[in-house]
Image (cartoon, rainbow, N blue to C red):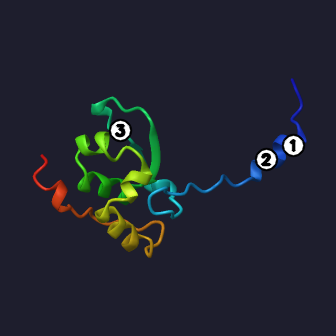
Amino acid sequence: MARKNRDEIASWNVEPEPVICPLCERVIPDDQKENHHLVPKSKGGKTTVCLHHVCHRQIHAIFTDAQLAKAFSTIAAMLEDPAVQKFVAWIKSKPPGFSDAARESASGRGRK
């Protein structure tokens, strides 16, 4: 049986790097992490980013899947939208574990 390397034991106490939400730039607590497909799976997307639960819900309240696939398939593109800018300005002042119901925007109404 191989002996344990001291370097391996020292790494046990290392804290993992905090995950930062690319939308609101706040630390994401473990219980708030959600993967967002930049292009929805229904439109063939595979690439994901980790977001706060509340940020993820808000993106889907603002945009339809077609809008996400066509014009908002990057965080940078989403951040250019006025509704997202308004949401980000509001959420940035909240603590990392804050959760609230998503507010439906005018562009997301009636999309069901």
Q: Disc 2 designates what residue?
A: 11
Q: Which mark is residue 7?
A: 1
Taking 36 as reference, is 10 left or right?
Answer: right
Up-down relation of residue 86 to residue 64 (above or below):
below
Q: Position of residue 94 (x, y in %)?
A: 43, 73
Q: Nearer the viewer, residue 84 or 32?
A: 84
Residue type at the position of mark 1: Asp
Taking 30 as reference, is 67 left or right?
Answer: left
Residue type at the position of mark 2: Ser
Residue at (51%, 54%) from the top-left corner?
Answer: 30
Q: Where is residue 4, by image quadrant?
A: top right
Q: Nearer the viewer, residue 75 or 93?
A: 75
The answer to whether the residues at label 2 and label 1 have Cβ atoms under 8 Å apart is: yes
Q: Nearer the viewer, residue 28 or 111?
A: 111
Question: Of discs 3 and 2, which sits in the foreground?
Answer: 3
Which type of secondary structure does the marked residue at label 1 adopt? helix
Q: Position of residue 93 (x, y in %)?
A: 44, 76
Q: Residues within 10 Å of mark 1 (few under 14, many from 20)?
A: few
